[in-house]
Image: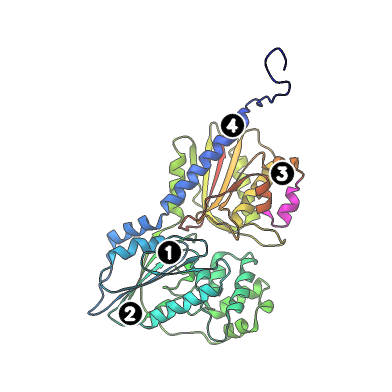
Amino acid sequence: MPRSGKPRYWWRKPARSPVRDRIAALKEAARAGFDAAVRRADPGRALARCLAQHPLPVPGPGGRFLVVAVGKAAPAMTRALLPQLTGRVEAICVTQTGNEEAAGSARVFRAGHPVPDHTGAEAAQAVIALLEGAGPDDRVIALISGGGSALLPAPPPGVTLADKQALNAALLASGLDIVAMNLVRQQISQLKGGGFLRLAAPAPVTAFVLSDVVGDDLRAIASGPTVAPLGTRAEARAILQSADLWDALPASIRNHLQGPEDRSPLPPASNHLIGGNAHSVEAAAKALSPDLSVIADPAPLTGDVSTAAARIFTALQQHRGHEGPLALVWGGETTVRLTGHGLGGRNQELALRVAALADARPLARPWVFLSGGTDGRDGPTDAAGAITDQNSLPRLRKIGADPEALLANNDSHRALTLSRDLLLTGATGTNVADVQILLLG
């Protein structure tokens, strides 16, 4: 050992980088804003606020409460509702696989999402049987949240679950927005587009809805089981044909969509919106405001991720001269048109695309960008989204990865795993679409 007393070989801690520290602080702030957005969408609290203003209906003599909860927030909504009910109660709760939250005394189904599975089909049949047994003195309570469309596949006669799975896979890969996809889905279901109401008649239906759809159109949330459909079979055919999907669909689906329209009046329902994306965007902005100047963009981020990324990068360029830290916050739901075979989701791909645009035209100040799904799951992955920064693409290149090739293959999850930029939250028990946060240091 040298006379100094130090070992011959020793490691010196690298000097702290002010830029690296600032990026880390910005990432921490972005995550705090996102967490605030998720908390605002807590389904139990949202339902409690609504029930304080809209008391539950009372069953008639000998009547029951029949509860159907469906969606990613179904267990939390069920737990909040059941203690409010007295007398005879029968409850079914349908949520996604991996959501292990308790749902009180309800019968629970954990079904496939985003592609329907046999558990979802079994759940749909249980819901149909419950509704068909409803009488005029019963009171049906529907608890609806995002994800419900895939979780309750109830194909009409002549259409199989495999046919529905093929349709859903084609829609998810098409780049169509959620409204167009749900218009089509409604026409291939016994429950969607008001089918729930037809099955429950003559029992009155009261629905409490947590919106995952930009604009909060009740017809599009979980494909609108308790409201009129978004369109007709003819419009569904037109959408599928314009997206070049029609000829590749199973013959049973094409035959069904070419059948006659149902013109019978839809039974009435009492629908209550209990929360949505705009509330969560507001909560994120409020959480960020003590430390940063905040601009919440009222125009949602929708459409293809490449278009949305360009819009975000334009905002980044426009505000690069702003003095002091700045936050820009959006809400919305984008789409991805699949051209490759990689693994990812719309939020991960959006975050990676923003990083790629900023890498091509670097800024002289630190920045981070977060895009996350409030349900905690982005596509068929374990991530809610990602938080990229100015060093994301350099980190990839440093280890020999090709960011452009990964993007071209829609392999955002692998890219962001390698760059250590994934946003991991686990299932949140809620779903009000996506939140995006751009921070400038």
Mark 1 residue element: helix
Of labels 4 and 2, earlier in sequence is 4
Where residue 347 appears, as percent x and y from the top left, is 59, 53
Mark 1 or mark 2: which comes first in sequence? Answer: 1
Q: Residue at x 50, y 54 (%)?
A: 374
Quote the CA–CA distance across marks 3 and 2: 58 Å
Report the amino acid beneath label 3.
Leu
> Where 48 falls versus 249 (above or below)?
above
The amino acid type, in three-letter code, at marker 2 is Ala
- Disc 4 marks a residue whose amino acid type is Asp
Residue 330, percent from left and from top? 52, 49
Label 3: few (<14), some or many (≥20) within 10 Å? some
- Distance (Cα) linking label 1 and label 3: 39 Å
> What residue would you read off at disc 3?
396
How far apart in space, not on screen, are marks 4 and 2 (Cα)?
60 Å
Q: Residue furthest top?
A: 3
Residue contact at pointers 3 and 4, CB within 8 angstroms: no
What x and y, as percent, mark residue 360? Answer: 72, 42
Which residue is tagged 4?
21
Specify the label residue 74 is tagged with: 1
Depth check, mark 3 against mark 2: the one in front is 3
* Residue segment shown in magenta: 401-412
Q: What distance separates the C-alpha of mark 1 from that of mark 2?
A: 22 Å
Between discs 1 and 3, the one toward the N terminus: 1
Quarter of the N terminus within the rendering: top right
- Real-space CA distance between mark 3 and mark 4, rounded to the nearest whole angstrom: 20 Å
Q: Pointer 1: residues within 10 angstroms few (<14), some, or many (20+)?
A: many
Q: For mark 2, what is the residue?
A: 203
Residues at badges 3 and 2 in contact (C-beta under 8 Å)?
no
Which amino acid does the dot numbered 1 rest on? Ala
